[in-house]
């Protein structure tokens, strides 16, 4: 396989893995303030407590792979989006701090403040991820010198904001299904209602975002003429979405969660197909875009990286599988819980 295409696919897999795994715990954070009382909020925190930091490794690995495989794209994106990335890092760090600091004091005011911080940081991080995806589809002002020629406020256009809100609804739905799997009793009954509301909001925003994309950015589906089998993924995506309410109605939350994960994976795949072969699309002139060839490292570097990936990925997948197996089942609040 072409090494440049191989690493573009690897970046897609890493992004999909992060969106699926960290998506549900970001979703739990978005729903956090809906919990009633301290005990329910502790259940929410402990449902993701053993997993959230491992999930974020996928994002770190994505950033490292982008830096090593496509350094020109990495330099352009991280320098041009500097303020946006600082806000994102602040949200992710504050989210982690909220998880660790909340239980250090019994004060209701202290815990309420960190609960609010946990919700805000989770929602802001998800919104920023979606805005980044929206700008990638819309294109950003990149000059012939591969430098970002825009402003931070220029990134906050209606379409990227819509994609950001859509991402919040997607992760909220994903997180609500996960919470249903991890809770029981009256709390689980209320979470079931949240799943229906979250799915309804997601479905409306999915339709709006799809219509807006097709109307304002028809180039996003240009590659489908060259890759006709990608339409199969479109169909599978629709079927996965349709199966979520069916599985919820049949009280098969595990299938609903798998359908939600499949929906996220399909959306990442379709985003990659729409972007290929570009990594950063220039809204000024198409020839100034950074693609998988003019932004890539040398072939020798890509080849060595592929060997390392083949060696390392089985360990990462095995570790992830073991952790999720060990912490399966319902949440139990114990002495060392959050």
Image (cartoon, rainbow, N blue to C red):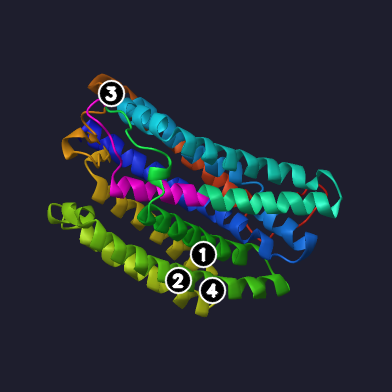
Q: Marks 1 and 2, Cα distance to the nearest angstrom?
A: 10 Å
Residue 274 among those drawn in magenta: no
Which residue has dot 1 on it? Answer: 173
Which residue has dot 3 on it? Answer: 297
Within-10-Å neighbours for mark 1: few <14, some 14–19, many 20+: many
Report if the CB atoms under discs 3 and 1 are less than 8 Å apart.
no
Residue depicted at 21% across the width and 61% down the height? 231
Residue 143 among those drawn in magenta: yes
Which quadrant of the rendered structure holds the N terminus? top left
Q: Position of residue 144 (x, y in %)?
A: 22, 28
Above or below residue 311? Residue 243 is below
Report if the CB atoms under discs 1 and 2 are less than 8 Å apart.
yes
Q: Is mark 3 on a helix, strand or loop?
A: loop
Query: What label sits on residue 244 in the rendered view?
Result: 2
Q: Position of residue 65 (x, y in %)?
A: 39, 31
Q: Is mark 1 on a helix, strand or loop?
A: helix
Question: Between residues 237 and 168, which one lies in front from this camera angle?
Answer: 168
Q: Is mark 2 on a helix, strand or loop?
A: helix
Q: Viewed as shown, does residue 332 lie left or right of 290?
A: right
Q: Which of marks 3 and 4 is nearer the N terminus?
A: 4
Q: Marks 3 and 1, Cα distance to the nearest angstrom?
A: 38 Å
Q: Marks 3 and 4, Cα distance to the nearest angstrom?
A: 46 Å
Magenta residues, as a range?
A: 126-145
Q: Nearer the viewer, mark 2 or mark 3?
A: 3
SS assignment for the magenta stretch, majority: helix
Query: What label sits on residue 197 in the rendered view?
Result: 4
Query: What label sits on residue 33 in the rendered view?
Result: none
Q: Earlier in the sequence, mark 1 or mark 2?
A: 1
């Amino acid at each position: 396989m072409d090494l440049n295409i191989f690493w573009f696919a690897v970046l897609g897999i890493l992004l999909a893995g992060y969106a699926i795994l960290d998506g549900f715990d970001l979703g739990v954070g978005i729903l956090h303030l809906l919990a009633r009382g301290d005990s329910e909020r502790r259940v929410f925190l402990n449902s993701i407590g053993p997993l959230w930091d491992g999930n974020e490794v996928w994002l770190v690995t994505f950033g490292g792979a982008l830096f090593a495989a496509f350094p020109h794209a990495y330099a352009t994106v991280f320098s041009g989006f500097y303020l946006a990335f600082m806000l994102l890092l602040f949200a992710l760090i504050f989210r982690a701090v909220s998880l660790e600091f909340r239980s250090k004091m019994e004060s209701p005011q202290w815990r309420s403040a960190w609960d609010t911080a946990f919700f805000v940081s989770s929602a802001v991080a998800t919104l920023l991820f979606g805005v980044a995806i929206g700008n990638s589809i819309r294109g950003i002002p990149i000059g012939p010198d591969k430098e970002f020629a825009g402003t931070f406020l220029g990134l906050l256009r209606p379409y990227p904001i819509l994609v950001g809100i859509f991402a919040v609804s997607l992760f909220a739905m994903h997180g609500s299904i996960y919470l249903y799997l991890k809770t029981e009793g009256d709390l689980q009954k209320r979470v079931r209602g949240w799943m229906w509301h979250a799915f309804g909001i997601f479905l409306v925003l999915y339709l709006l975002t799809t219509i807006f994309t097709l109307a304002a950015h028809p180039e996003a589906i240009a590659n489908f003429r060259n890759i006709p089998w990608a339409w199969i993924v479109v169909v599978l995506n629709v079927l996965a979405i349709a199966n979520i309410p069916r599985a919820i109605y049949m009280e098969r939350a595990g299938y609903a969660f798998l359908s939600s994960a499949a929906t996220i994976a399909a959306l990442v795949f379709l985003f990659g197909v729409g972007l290929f072969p570009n990594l950063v699309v220039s809204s000024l002139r198409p020839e100034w875009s950074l693609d998988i060839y003019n932004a890539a490292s040398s072939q020798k570097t890509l080849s060595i990286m592929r060997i390392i990936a083949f060696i390392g990925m089985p360990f990462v997948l095995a570790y992830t599988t073991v952790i999720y197996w060990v912490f399966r089942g319902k949440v139990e609040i114990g002495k060392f819980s959050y």
